[in-house]
Image (cartoon, rainbow, N blue to C red):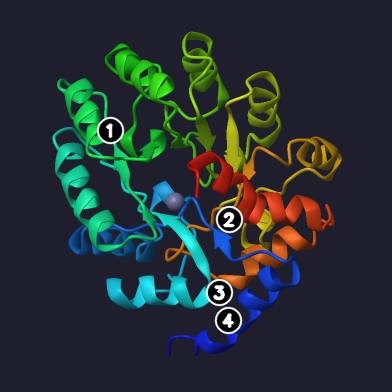
């Protein structure tokens, strides 16, 4: 039997969290929306506990139809979210971007999201997406199995840096490493594009220290909290307590992300996981709402 969920109770809990901080709601920069058949394939993959997710048992808590998934985010009081989508092979990104543009049109609280892949034509379709109003990009170094510093992406990183459009990059080696994951390829991208607004997904799990170091070095580098600090992740790839002061000091560069709906626990757990870091209400307000509001002009 699937676990019983109490979504009304969860919504009350989430609202109590942001209400108690005096916030108008949450901004969640890392939520997944994609064409239904692609999302179902992702869920099927999670069901197999495959190598890309480290062979882990990973029940999807919010396996629902799209309209129910957006409605629940609204019940939680998430005022702005994204449609993180990404290709695992060439020839897919432009099609995904078309879907995401349409999704953003019919979902006004979703920040119009786009994606990219190192392939011929990437410069042209990224420019098209920007002209169509894309406000954030997502790229996945592990699933895509490419070097983010690939020559074919240089023009694109330059364009996005120039336009000030953030890119959420899954580049850490968690939950499982890829050929090009880790801080080194990202450091090469930033050396050439120091103004790129990179948002390191999952706090760079498990290379937390190295990715925090990149944020300390480059003013436009940010990190999202996605799944980090939760019981699930702490068991596998714990965030070192001794670098908490550095996390506190970077309070203006950390953004709430959740991985909703593909999470193996209820949504409020991510918020409790942030709260129990004990970095204080000011840090929580910045991370859970204000930093994204500033970055995206919400
Ligand atoms: Zn994700």
Q: In this view, does 91 lie to the left or right of 279?
A: left
Residue 227: numbered disc: 2
In which quadrant of the rendered view does residue 126 lie? Answer: top left
| Mark with earlier residue (1, 2) | 1
Between circles 1 and 4, the one closer to the viewer is 1
Label 2 beta carbon less than 8 Å to ligand 1: yes
In which quadrant of the rendered view does residue 216 lie? Answer: top right
| Mark with earlier residue (3, 2) | 2
| Mark with earlier residue (1, 4) | 4
Q: 271 above or below 112?
A: below
The x, y position of residue 239, in whole percent, is 73, 46
- Residue neighbourhood size for the residue with mark 4, other residues' Cα within 10 Å, grouped as few (<14), some (14–19), many (≥20): some
User: What's the distance in space between the residues labelled 1 and 4, CA to CA?
Assistant: 36 Å
Looking at the image, do the residues carrying marks 3 and 4 touch, with CB atoms under 8 Å apart? yes
Q: What element carries label 3?
A: loop
Between circles 1 and 2, the one closer to the viewer is 1
Residue 182: numbered disc: none
Q: Is residue 7 visible?
A: yes
Badge 4 is on which residue? Answer: 10
Between circles 2 and 4, the one closer to the viewer is 4
Residue under the image location 21 percent in, 36 percent down: 89
Badge 1 is on which residue? Answer: 130
Label 3 beta carbon less than 8 Å to ligand 1: no
The x, y position of residue 298, in whole percent, is 50, 50
Looking at the image, do the residues carrying marks 3 and 1 touch, with CB atoms under 8 Å apart? no
User: What's the distance in space between the residues labelled 3 and 1, CA to CA?
Assistant: 34 Å
User: What's the distance in space between the residues labelled 3 and 2, CA to CA?
Assistant: 11 Å
Q: Is residue 57 left or right of residue 236?
A: left
Foreground: 7 or 252? 252
Badge 3 is on which residue? Answer: 266
């Amino acid at each position: 039997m699937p676990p019983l969920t109490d979504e009304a109770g969860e919504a009350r809990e989430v609202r109590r969290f942001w209400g108690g901080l005096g916030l108008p709601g949450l901004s969640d920069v890392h939520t997944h929306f994609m064409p239904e058949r692609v999302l179902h394939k992702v869920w099927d993959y999670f069901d197999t506990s495959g190598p890309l997710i480290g062979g882990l048992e990973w029940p999807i808590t919010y396996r629902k139809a799209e309209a129910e998934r957006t409605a629940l985010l609204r019940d939680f009081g998430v005022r702005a979210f994204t449609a993180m989508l990404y290709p695992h092979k060439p020839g897919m990104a432009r099609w995904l971007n078309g879907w995401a543009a349409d999704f953003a049109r019919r979902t006004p609280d979703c920040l119009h999201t786009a994606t990219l892949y190192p392939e011929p034509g990437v410069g042209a379709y990224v420019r098209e997406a920007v002209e169509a109003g894309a406000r954030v990009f997502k790229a996945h170094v592990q699933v895509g199995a490419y070097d983010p510093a690939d020559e074919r992406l240089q023009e694109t990183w330059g364009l996005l840096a120039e336009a000030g459009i953030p890119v959420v990059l899954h580049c850490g080696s968690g939950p499982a490493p890829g050929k090009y994951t880790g801080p080194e390829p990202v450091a090469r991208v930033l050396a050439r594009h120091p103004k790129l607004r990179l948002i390191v997904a999952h706090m760079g799990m498990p290379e937390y220290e190295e990715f925090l170091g990149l944020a300390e070095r480059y003013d436009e580098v940010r990190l999202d909290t996605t799944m980090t600090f939760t019981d699930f992740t702490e068991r596998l790839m714990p965030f070192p307590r001794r670098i908490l002061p550095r996390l506190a000091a970077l309070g203006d560069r950390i953004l709430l992300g959740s991985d909703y709906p593909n999470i193996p626990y209820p949504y409020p757990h991510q918020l409790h996981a942030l709260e129990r870091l004990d970095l204080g209400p000011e840090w929580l307000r910045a991370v859970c709402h204000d930093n994204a509001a500033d970055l995206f002009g919400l």
